[in-house]
Image (spheres, coloured by chain):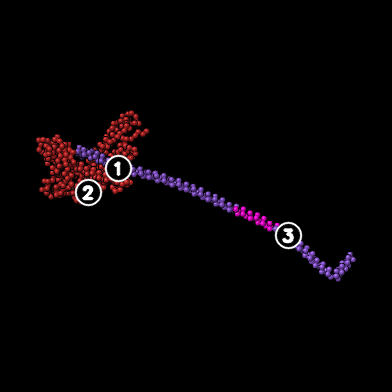
C-alpha cells in the first residue's frame, strides 16, 4: 500500500522546509509578535495598576476633602454659635448697663428734683415771709394811718377781753 | 480539487465515448482506456504525483512540469517530469546521466543496464528495475513550498505591523492574525505546558499549527487539484517525528521516572507498566501521524467518491445529489482543517507538558 508508506522524498523535503520555516518564523515573526503582545500586556497591566492607584489616591483625597469639609463645617457652626452667644450676652450686658445707668440717672434726677424742690421751698418760704412782712408792714402802715379804725380795733379787742 | 477533477473526468469520458482516436493515442492515463474506475481516480488524486496536473484540454493534460531529482549509482540525476510525456505506466523511457528511467504509478524506476523495457511479474511489479532514492519536487513538495511562502508573507508582514506601530496596536493583518496566535498561546500552550515553561515551545507550536492548517486548507481548494499534503503520511510522519524528538529531548527526570519506574505503585505493577509506558512513548507520535493523515485523506476520499457516483451511475440525474453531498462534506472539511491543526498542536503541547511536568506530591 503506497498510501500508508511514507515516501522518502516528501519526508526529506518536509523536514527541510519545516525546519527552515520554523527558524525563519521564530526569528522574524514569532519573537517580535509575541514580544510585542507581551509588552502590550505588561503595559496594560501597568496602566491598570496605576489607574487603580490613582483611583485609590482620589478616594483618599476625597475622604480628606470630606473630613476637611466636615471640620470646616463644625468650625463654622461653633463660630456661629459663639457669635450668637456673644450677641446675646452683649445685648444682655448692654440692657443691664443701660438699665443701671437709667436707674442712676433717674435717681440723680430725683435727688436733684428733691433738692431743687427743697431749695425752691426754702426760697418760697423766705419769699412768703418777706411778702408777709411787707404785706403786714403795708397793712400795719395802712391800719396805723387810720386812727379811728385803730381805736375801734382796740376797743373791739378790749371788749372781747372783757368778755373773757 | 473536486471541481477540476469533475471537469477533467468529464473531458476524459467525453473523448472516450466519441472514441477520438487521434487524441486517445496521446492520452497516456491508463484509466481513460477502460471503464471509469473510481478507486483508481481517487487514489490518483489522494496520492502524490511528479507533475502538477491542472486539467485536460481537448484530451491533452494541461500540467505544470516539476523537476525530478534522483540519487542514483551515478550520483545526482535531475530532469524535468515533462520528459515522461504524462506517461505513468512505464512505457516512456528517459535516458539521463547514464541511467534509463520510467515512471510507473507515480514512482520512478531505474531500468537495469541491459533492459530496454519494463517487464512485469504477475502482480504487475517490475522485475527488471530498481527504485533510486527519489527526492523529486513533487506536487506535494511544490504545494508545501507555496504554503511556506504564503506563511512567510503572512507572518512577516504581521511582524512588520508591530515593528512600525509605536504602541504595538494590532492593525491590518495583525488584527486578524493576533487572535489566532493568542489562541495558540492561551488555549493550547499555557494550559497544556504551564505558565512558566510554555514560552520555549511557542515557536514550534505556532509553526506547526499554521503549517498544518494552511496545508489542510490548500487541500480543499479545487484549482490546486489534489494538493493533499497534510493527507500524506510522509508529511504527518515527519511532523510527528519532530514532536517525538522535542518531547524526548525535553523530558525531565520526572518524565523518565514515570516511564521506567512508575512512582506510587507496587513493584510488580512498576515492572508491568514499564513496557506499556515505553510502547506509549512511541504510540503517541504514531497516533498523531495517523490521525492527521486519516482525517484529511478520508475527507478527500469522501468528496471524490461522491463525485465519482455521477460516473459510476453514468447519469447526470445523480449530479445534484453528488454536488449537494460533496458541498456538505466540503463545509465539514473546512471545519476539520482547523480542528485537525488544533488537535495536532494541542496534543504536541500536551506531550511537551508531560515531558516537562515537575514532581508534585
- Confirm whether the magenta stretch covers residue A127: no
Of the pair B170 and B102, the residue shown nearer to us: B170
Residue receiving disc 1:
A32
Can residue B207 be seen here? The reply is no
Q: Nearer the viewer, residue A65 or B354?
A: A65
Dot 1: chain letter: A
- Chain hosting mark 3: A
Q: Are marks 2 and 3 in contact (CB under 8 Å)?
A: no
Across and down, in percent, residue B306 comes to 22, 47
* Disc 2: which residue: B322
| Residue A97 falls inside the magenta stretch | yes
Secondary structure beneath dot 1 equals helix
Q: Which residues are magenta?
A: A90-111
Name the residue carrying label 3. A119
Mark 1 vs 3: CB contact within 8 A = no
Badge nearest the viewer, 2 or 1? 1
Q: Residues within 10 Å of mark 2 (few under 14, many from 20)?
A: many
The residue located at (34%, 29%) in the rendering is B266
Q: What residue occupies the far right of the structure in this picture?
A: A162
Side (left or right) of A110 relative to B115: right
Indicate the colour of chain A. Answer: purple
Identify the residue shown where x is 56% and y is 52%: A83
Q: Nearer the viewer, mark 2 or mark 3?
A: 3
Figure colour of chain B: red
Q: Decide: few, some or many residues near mark 1? Use Cα within 10 Å; few <14, some 14-19, many ≥20.
A: many
> Is B358 placed above or below B210 here?
above
Considering every residue shown, the one lying at the far top of the view is B267
Q: What is the chief secondary structure element of the magenta stretch?
A: helix
Q: Element type at marker 2?
A: helix
Q: Are marks 2 and 3 on the same chain?
A: no
Q: Which residue occupies 25% across, 36% down?
A: B241
Please state which of residues B160 and A104 is positioned toward the viewer in this rendering: A104
Amino acid at each position: 500500500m503506497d498510501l500508508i508508506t511514507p515516501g522518502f522524498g516528501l519526508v526529506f523535503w518536509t523536514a527541510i522546509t519545516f525546519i527552515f520555516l520554523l527558524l525563519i518564523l521564530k526569528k522574524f515573526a514569532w519573537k517580535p509578535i509575541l514580544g510585542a503582545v507581551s509588552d502590550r500586556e505588561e503595559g496594560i497591566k501597568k496602566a491598570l495598576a496605576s489607574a487603580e492607584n490613582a483611583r485609590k489616591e482620589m478616594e483618599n483625597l476625597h475622604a480628606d476633602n470630606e473630613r476637611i469639609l466636615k471640620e470646616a463645617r463644625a468650625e463654622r457652626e461653633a463660630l456661629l454659635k459663639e457669635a450668637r452667644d456673644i450677641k446675646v450676652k452683649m445685648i444682655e450686658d448692654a440692657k443691664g448697663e443701660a438699665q443701671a445707668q437709667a436707674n442712676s440717672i433717674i435717681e440723680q434726677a430725683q435727688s436733684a428734683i428733691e433738692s431743687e424742690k427743697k431749695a425752691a421751698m426754702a426760697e418760697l418760704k423766705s419769699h412768703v415771709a418777706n411778702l408777709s412782712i411787707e404785706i403786714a408792714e403795708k397793712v400795719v402802715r395802712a391800719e396805723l394811718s387810720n386812727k379811728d379804725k385803730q381805736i375801734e380795733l382796740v376797743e373791739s379787742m378790749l371788749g372781747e377781753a372783757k368778755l373773757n | 480539487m473536486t471541481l477540476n477533477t469533475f471537469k477533467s473526468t468529464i473531458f476524459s469520458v467525453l473523448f472516450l465515448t466519441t472514441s477520438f482516436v487521434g487524441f486517445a493515442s496521446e492520452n497516456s492515463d491508463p484509466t481513460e482506456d477502460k471503464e471509469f474506475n473510481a478507486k483508481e481516480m481517487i487514489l490518483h488524486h489522494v496520492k502524490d504525483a511528479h507533475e502538477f496536473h491542472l486539467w485536460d484540454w481537448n484530451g491533452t493534460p494541461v500540467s505544470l512540469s516539476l523537476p525530478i531529482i534522483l540519487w542514483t549509482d551515478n550520483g545526482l540525476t535531475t530532469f524535468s517530469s515533462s520528459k515522461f510525456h504524462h506517461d505513468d505506466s512505464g512505457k516512456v523511457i528517459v535516458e539521463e546521466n547514464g541511467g534509463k528511467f520510467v515512471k510507473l504509478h507515480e514512482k520512478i524506476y531505474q531500468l537495469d543496464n541491459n533492459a530496454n523495457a519494463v517487464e512485469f511479474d504477475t502482480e504487475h511489479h517490475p522485475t527488471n528495475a530498481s527504485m533510486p532514492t527519489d527526492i523529486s519536487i513533487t506536487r506535494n513538495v511544490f504545494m508545501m513550498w507555496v504554503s511556506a511562502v504564503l506563511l512567510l508573507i503572512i507572518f512577516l508582514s504581521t511582524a512588520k505591523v508591530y515593528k512600525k506601530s509605536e504602541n504595538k496596536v494590532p492593525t491590518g493583518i495583525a488584527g486578524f492574525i493576533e487572535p489566532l496566535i493568542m489562541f495558540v498561546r492561551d488555549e493550547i500552550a499555557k494550559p497544556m505546558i504551564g505558565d512558566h515553561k510554555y514560552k520555549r515551545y511557542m515557536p514550534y507550536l505556532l509553526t506547526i499549527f499554521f503549517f498544518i492548517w494552511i496545508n489542510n486548507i490548500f487541500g480543499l481548494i479545487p484549482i490546486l487539484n489534489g494538493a493533499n499534503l497534510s493527507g500524506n503520511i510522509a508529511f504527518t510522519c515527519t511532523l510527528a517525528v519532530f514532536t517525538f524528538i522535542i518531547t524526548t529531548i525535553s523530558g525531565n527526570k520526572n518524565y523518565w521516572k514515570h516511564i521506567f519506574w512508575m512512582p506510587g505503585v507496587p513493584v510488580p505493577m512498576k515492572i508491568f507498566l514499564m513496557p506499556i509506558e515505553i510502547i506509549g512513548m512511541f504510540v503517541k507520535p504514531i497516533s498523531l501521524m495517523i490521525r492527521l493523515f486519516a482525517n484529511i485523506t478520508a475527507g478527500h476520499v469522501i468528496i471524490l467518491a461522491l463525485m465519482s457516483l455521477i460516473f459510476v451511475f453514468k447519469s447526470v440525474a445523480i449530479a445534484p445529489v453528488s454536488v449537494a453531498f460533496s458541498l456538505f462534506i466540503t463545509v465539514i472539511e473546512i471545519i476539520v482543517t482547523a480542528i485537525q491543526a488544533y488537535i495536532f498542536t494541542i496534543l504536541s503541547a500536551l506531550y511537551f507538558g508531560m515531558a516537562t511536568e515537575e514532581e508534585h506530591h
